[in-house]
Image (spheres, rainbow, N blue to C red):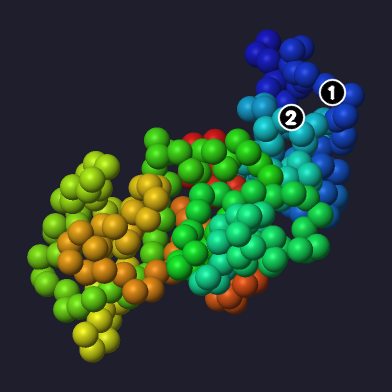
Amino acid sequence: MPRDDRSPKPDAPVYESAERLQKVLAAAGVGSRRACEDLIFRRRVTVNGRVAQLGDKADPTRDVIVVDGERLQADVRLVYVAMNKPRGVVTTMADEKGRTELADFIGARLEQRVYHVGRLDADSEGLLLLTNDGTLAHKLMHPSYEVLKTYLAEVAGPIPRNLSKRLLAGVELEDGPVKLDSFKLVDTLGKSAQVELTLHEGRKHIVRRLMAEVGHPVSRLIRTSIGPIKLGDLRTGRLRRLTNAEVAALFKAVGD
């Protein structure tokens, strides 16, 4: 008789810290326990690749839990935060020169100690991700995962028609070539222009150096997205926790 994949596998680990799966899902914000039980009953939840069933337990600190095809970060100790970094703020938690830093904005808003994912130089502003999930942070920053970042830049104009083609083809800098994934002229503002550019590079000052190299230095730079996470209407200096869907989208962006 063929094996029913809903039955527990002999080698499925059960940890001492495991809890009822519906309780884990509810604690992670998926829904009420009753709603989570319904998800499990409808075979929409897997734990470590196995279709879950009512009565199963899971350890949110160890197990990979997937709901409707999207990985759920069920470990409530991990936090994922978006911040709109103001201009003039250095991307550090403890600046030895006494400049305005991230810690001045986070303060007591977060109980957990978090770290910034990548950097924005002091003169740049916009989206910054903060988390205590070191594994995900590393993947988001590593160039091999090619997580796209989009910026809105005010640059010296006018913009020639062939600039987009040149930037998409690649420009040689002193530390190697760089090319954009996309480029768009948003608006012209007298002798300056507003452009949107996307790339997966993470080298220091890469956008400013690139645009200066092609003769259009940046006077203002705002990061508007990191992978699937958008800055949206988050006000300058404010923070917000990412939703479960946004965290799942970040895992998907790095192939988890």
Residue 40 image position (x, y, % from top left) = 75, 40
Could you tell me which quadrant the C terminus lies in? top right
Inspect this view and state whether residue 6 appears.
Answer: yes
Kindly state the secondary structure of the residue where label 1 is placed. Answer: loop
Kindly state the secondary structure of the residue where label 2 is placed. Answer: loop
Q: Are marks 1 and 2 in contact (CB under 8 Å)?
A: yes
59 vs 91: above or below: above
Outermost bottom residue: 190
Q: In the rendered view, does 110 fall on the left or right side of 98?
A: right
Residue ID at (76%, 22%): 7
The local crowd at label 1, few if under 14, some if 14 to 19, many if 20 or more residues have their Cα within 10 Å, is: few
Q: Which residue is mark 2?
A: 62
Residue 135 image position (x, y, % from top left) = 60, 36
Q: Amino acid at mark 2?
A: Arg
Residue ID at (64%, 49%): 115
Q: Which residue is mark 1?
A: 15
